[in-house]
Amino acid sequence: MLIRCALLEDATSVNERLGAMRAEISLIDGEEVWITFDELLWPEDKEPTSALAVAAKLGLEVEQELSLFTEPFAWPDLGSVTSKTEEFTATLLKAYEEHGVIKR
């Protein structure tokens, strides 16, 4: 849970927070943390510096990989343009409405 909390600290956009929450985190042999990020939610070039620092304090090595998870929402890029969840939700609902997916 400490690694996930640190990932949330590293996140600066809605997409990255979703990526931190959806990341698969495994402890291997009590010595290594394996983090698998969703490539649509966590930027490939973003280092999870807080998570790495927490792992170091715990004496754990970290391995990272990207994988394609099932998308939680259509238009996953919408979450990369804002850090406000409320704004992301409004934009997402508007996009769904414009495409006839939901009606209000």
Image: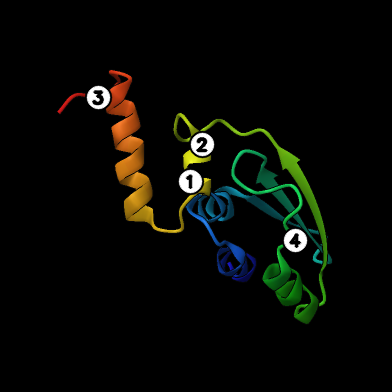
Would you place residue 84 above or below residue 65 in this image?
A: below
In the rendered structure, which disc, 1 or 4, sits on the residue that comes first in sequence?
4
Whether pointer 2 and pointer 1 mark residues with C-beta atoms closer than 8 Å, the reply is yes
In the rendered structure, which disc, 4 or 3, sits on the residue that comes first in sequence?
4
Q: Which amino acid lies under the numbered mark 4 shown in the image of this protein? A: Glu
Going 62% across and 50% down the picture, which residue do you hit? Answer: 23
The residue identified by callout 1 is 79
Q: Which residue is nearer to you in this view: 85 or 50?
A: 85
The residue identified by callout 2 is 76
> Residue 50, which numbered label?
none
Question: From the image, which quarter does the N terminus lie in?
Answer: bottom right
Residue 30 horizontal/vertical position (percent):
80, 66
Residue at the far left: name it.
104
In the rendered structure, which disc, 2 or 4, sits on the residue that comes first in sequence?
4
Whether pointer 3 and pointer 1 mark residues with C-beta atoms closer than 8 Å, the reply is no
Q: Which residue is nearer to you in this view: 96 or 71?
A: 96
Residue 20 horizontal/vertical position (percent):
58, 55
The residue identified by callout 3 is 102
In the rendered structure, which disc, 3 or 1, sits on the residue that comes first in sequence?
1
Q: Which amino acid lies under the numbered mark 1 shown in the image of this protein? A: Gly
Residue 87 horizontal/vertical position (percent):
34, 51
Going 19% across and 24% down the picture, which residue do you hit? Answer: 103
Classify 10 Å Cα crowding around label 2: few (below 14), some (14-19), many (20 and above).
Answer: some
Classify 10 Å Cα crowding around label 3: few (below 14), some (14-19), many (20 and above).
Answer: few
